Amino acid sequence: MKYIIRWLGIFLALSCVQISYAAAGTKEQDKYEHWLKEEVALLIMPEEREAFKKLTDDKQKDQFIELFWAKRDPTRGTRENEFREEWYKRLDYVTRAYSSGSVPKGWHTDMGRVYMILGPPVRTQALAGGVKSESSGGSQMVANAESWLYRPMPDLGLHDAFRVTFRNYQYGYDLDVNTSQKILRALEIFRKKVIFNPDLKEPPLSRFKLDKNSFEGSLIQDFAATGEEVKQIALEWQPIFGLAPFGDTNITLLVRVDSQSIDTTKSVEVTFFGRLKGEGERFQEFLKTVELEKGPGDRWLAVFSFFASPGASVLYLGVRDADKKNYTLLKSDLNVENFNTSELNTSSLILCSEVIPRPKVEASEESSPFVTEQFEATPRWGNVFEGGETLNVLFQIYNAGLKKNAVSLVAEYFIVTPKLAFRLDPQVIKEKIDEHSGLTGGTQVPLSPLKPGSYTFVVRLTDNIANTTIEKSADFVVK
């Protein structure tokens, strides 16, 4: 993440509000040509330009544009793309400031192009022209000039404060012919330097939104406005966190539903819907129809997942029966864990009594902490176990250090009570993986030696390459 923070320094006036830019009178059928020739002409790479020109339908072009900006998103794990917002802000400014009758597009001017690439200068200075004497005895007319002062931009090879000078030649202010090669080089390499995610192959997942006119959408809109809960279907839920694509967090809710609240003789399906509202105006909505599975006693279990941005949030959770006659609306604070860092981390710990091998998961399957490429775990509500069962612990490992494409980890396991701590056999994990790939960790513990009571399972993970140690824990009960 260091390179992201460093690059943000180039943009001197980031805006939190995205400015939509479109030339007045641009026809709908010409919007793609306008995007290519006017909006991103200074950004797009030659090979990208040729690839875009070969696309034949609007859907392909829309997907291309979405991926184009995703590659240029300095903070991929957030909803905002600060670079795109700043780019359109600059484009709007240069259109107003530097367009004229002879040059209808401000970015076509040298001043407009420099402003688009380097941003607003720290200050400007007007320089008067005049007559300059030459050593040969003659004289030379020097045009009026304007000088822009900038702070250092080391990522563009400009390690000291510098000036860009424009002279008022015959047709307006153009770059001084004596502009240094370092500055010209910086203007040239900019479009390549701002591709923060060059290996991205597909755009981030679209943010789902409920239809505001639907049954679920209207309920959530009113609920978010009033905060008034409705409890027609009795339920409890537990969150489980893991890493999702593009820096999001995968939130899985394990839900226990009281069978007396629904008619399971008609259907064992319920629909979960809701909104997770983060800081400011950002939010993520979801709609999931789930088949209930029989749990202990008269309770039924459901599992569903959705992606969201990390951070402090408020969850507006709804569930309805198949007939839409009964529903529940619950509100709760939810601190969504952030896995989009370079630091060693693990998902939430999954405690269960049964883990079975399984074939590799297809890419189309919904992400679930109970399903990995190698195993499938049976959810256990409340982490309550019988004394004769085996406790299975399952978790994902993120951001482990690599040396020659291999990790070097030690996983230590402990069972802790207020008075005692039991240390289990540690595991040494040395495995070759692809960069940015995760690992599945876990162990099995027979519970027969433990007396009935409450316990905490602790995983201590040490990365020998990064010289880092973290701990994760989960409480459980032995009956």
Image (cartoon, helix red, strand yellow):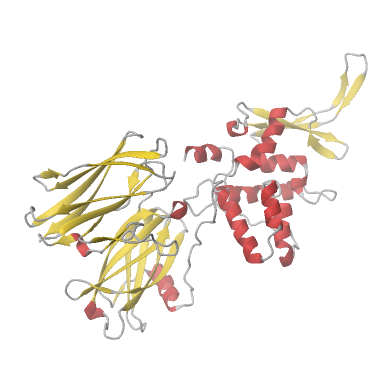
Who is closer to the viewer here, 233 or 207? 207
Where residue 455 sits: x, y (%)? Answer: 14, 52
Q: Is residue 73 visible?
A: yes
Left or right of residue 325: residue 191? right
Who is closer to the viewer here, 114 or 350? 350
As displayed, is residue 289 above or below residue 466? below
Q: Is residue 92 visible?
A: no
Question: Residue 350 appears in which quarter of the rendering?
Answer: bottom left
Where residue 242 sits: x, y (%)? Answer: 35, 54
Who is closer to the viewer here, 231 or 346? 346
Single out the residue that lies furthest toward the right: 138
In the rendered view of the protein, which quadrant contains the C terminus?
A: bottom left
As displayed, is residue 380 above or below residue 265? above
Who is closer to the viewer here, 349 or 124? 349
Question: Residue 387 appears in which quarter of the rendering?
Answer: bottom left
Single out the residue that lies furthest toward the bottom: 266
Give the residue drawn at x 43%, y 71%.
221
Where residue 425 sits: x, y (%)? Answer: 18, 43
Give the residue drawn at x 23%, y 46%.
459
Left or right of residue 150: residue 255? left
Q: How many marks?
A: 0
